[in-house]
């Protein structure tokens, strides 16, 4: 027993975790498996409880829809209640938005933001005063000339129409052009010229009377200065109010609206100025007595697609027919507008607008007329921003629809219910 114990003590070895106990004797060796001792995990150390989640219960789709509808209704009521006093503030916001890029460039150049805003607003007011002092009296004198010579112009147009119808009667025969048709065309031609001239006088006189309102002259520059000075801070503050869940999507759509709106507004403003100068200079050089007024009006109305050109061309050709005794003057006036259309279509529009503007001409025309019918001149100012926003949102939801299962789900196979 002692020898066995000695052998057990001398010849036994422990192989560690997962090892074996070996017994070696004279007659041989016997190996017994030994189970590894279990590893006990340390008990977790109790720590402070996790902080409560800052997010409360999620909003439902119905709540989000109700909030959106409430904001739209509030904006509509504000426009309805305060439309008479909002015009200077909306005009000031448009000026600040238009002048923000040059103000930012001046700020990056080292000028304080307030100094840059003051410089730009002062330059804009100086240009307005220069225009009022130099061109406004001349335009008013031309309007007076138009009103004074309107009866003579109407008579000349009637004689011109009568002569044209007489030539048509000689070529086509009395069965196609009779005396009643000649008298009707001659009378309607004079009436049309009277209506166009009166509308042009009301348009120019009403627009300038609107801009001579005390609120636009005093309130708009002051409000524009403060908005332009604080524009980056206002944008950052509004950005901080965005809901965190949808902030990225809203920022992306806002950048798209800003891209389209800035391209349209700044590009269209440059187009209107260039066309106004071109038409005024061309019609004046052609000898048209009211060329300055008609040219400026046609150029400034070019922000409405086709309306400015058509109105200016019809008015100018009618006045040319009444003023010039031959077809040469009428042809020269017509060539001025043809050249203006070529200049706009092949040089001005591709250079300043191009493919950056995703506003269809029909959509712009509808927005301008709808805004004017709803809120007057204030609606005209708000029409293009609202149209650009609606267009961006419509394209966004259209992309989501085209990527949704509602659109991508394949049609049901025959014999299977959808």
Image (cartoon, rainbow, N blue to C red):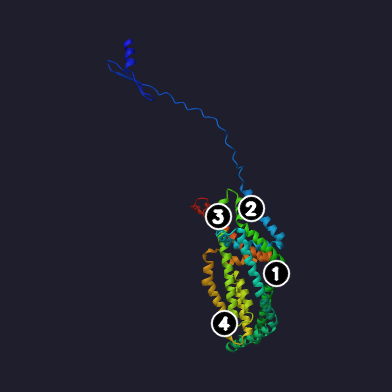
| Separation (CA) of disc 4 from disc 1 | 35 Å
Whether residue 397 can be seen here: no
Q: Earlier in the sequence, mark 4 or mark 3?
A: 3
Q: Earlier in the sequence, mark 1 or mark 3?
A: 1
Q: Secondary structure at mark 2?
A: helix
Q: In the rendered image, which residue does mark 1 sit on?
A: 212
Q: Is residue 355 above or below residue 155?
A: above
Q: Residues within 10 Å of mark 1 (few under 14, many from 20)?
A: few
Q: Residues within 10 Å of mark 3 (few under 14, many from 20)?
A: few
Instruction: Mark 4 vs mark 1: give the one in front.
Output: 1
Residue 68's disc number: 2
Q: Position of residue 167 (x, y in %)?
A: 60, 88
Quick check: 373 left or right of 10?
right
Q: Residues within 10 Å of mark 2 (few under 14, many from 20)?
A: few
Instruction: Mark 2 vs mark 4: give the one in front.
Output: 4
Q: How many marks can you see? A: 4
Q: Is residue 33 above or below residue 108?
A: above
Q: Earlier in the sequence, mark 1 or mark 2?
A: 2
Q: Quadrant of the N terminus?
A: top left
Q: Report which quarter residue 309 is drawn in.
A: bottom right
Tags 2 and 4 touching, CB below 8 Å = no
Residue 332's disc number: 4
Q: Earlier in the sequence, mark 2 or mark 4?
A: 2
Q: Position of residue 281 (x, y in %)?
A: 59, 78
Residue 252's disc number: 3
Q: Residue at x 56, y 59 (%)?
A: 110
Whether residue 274 can be seen here: yes
Q: Is residue 161 above or below residue 403?
A: below
Q: Earlier in the sequence, mark 4 or mark 1?
A: 1
């Amino acid at each position: 027993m002692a020898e066995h114990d000695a052998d057990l003590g001398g010849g036994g070895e422990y192989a560690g975790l997962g090892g074996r106990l070996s017994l070696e004797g004279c007659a041989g060796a016997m190996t017994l498996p030994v189970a590894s001792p279990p590893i006990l995990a340390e008990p977790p150390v109790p720590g402070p409880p996790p902080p409560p989640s800052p997010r409360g219960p999620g909003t439902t789709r119905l709540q989000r829809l109700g909030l959106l509808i409430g904001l739209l209704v509030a904006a509509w009521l504000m426009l309805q209640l305060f439309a008479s006093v909002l015009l200077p503030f909306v005009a000031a916001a448009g000026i600040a938005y238009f002048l923000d890029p040059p103000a930012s460039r001046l700020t990056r150049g080292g000028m304080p933001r307030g100094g840059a805003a003051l410089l730009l607003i002062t330059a804009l007011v100086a240009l307005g005063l220069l225009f009022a002092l130099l061109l406004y009296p001349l335009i008013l004198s031309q309007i007076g000339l138009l009103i004074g010579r309107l009866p003579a112009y109407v008579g000349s147009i009637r004689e011109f129409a009568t002569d044209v119808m007489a030539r048509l009667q000689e070529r086509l025969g009395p069965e196609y052009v009779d005396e009643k048709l000649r008298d009707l065309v001659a009378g309607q031609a004079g009436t049309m010229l009277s209506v166009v001239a009166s509308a042009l006088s009301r348009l120019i006189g009403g627009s300038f009377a609107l801009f001579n309102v005390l609120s636009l002259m005093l309130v708009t520059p002051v409000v524009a200065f403060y908005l332009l000075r604080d524009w980056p801070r206002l944008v950052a503050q509004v950005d901080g109010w965005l809901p965190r869940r949808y902030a990225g999507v809203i920022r992306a759509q806002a950048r798209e609206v800003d891209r389209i709106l800035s391209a349209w507004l700044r590009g269209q403003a440059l187009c209107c100025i260039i066309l106004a100068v071109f038409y005024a200079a061309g019609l004046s050089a052609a000898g048209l007595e009211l060329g300055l007024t008609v040219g400026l009006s046609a150029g400034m109305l070019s922000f409405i697609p086709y309306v400015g050109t058509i109105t200016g061309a019809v008015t100018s050709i009618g006045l040319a027919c009444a003023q010039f005794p031959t077809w040469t003057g009428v042809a020269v006036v017509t060539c001025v507008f043809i050249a203006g259309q070529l200049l706009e279509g092949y040089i001005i529009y591709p250079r300043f607008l191009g493919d950056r503007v995703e506003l269809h001409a029909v959509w712009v025309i509808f927005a301008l007329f709808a805004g004017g019918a709803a809120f007057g001149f204030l609606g005209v100012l708000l029409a293009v921003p609202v149209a650009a926003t609606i267009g961006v949102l419509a394209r966004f939801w259209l992309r989501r629809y085209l990527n949704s299962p509602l659109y991508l789900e394949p049609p049901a196979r025959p014999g299977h219910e959808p």
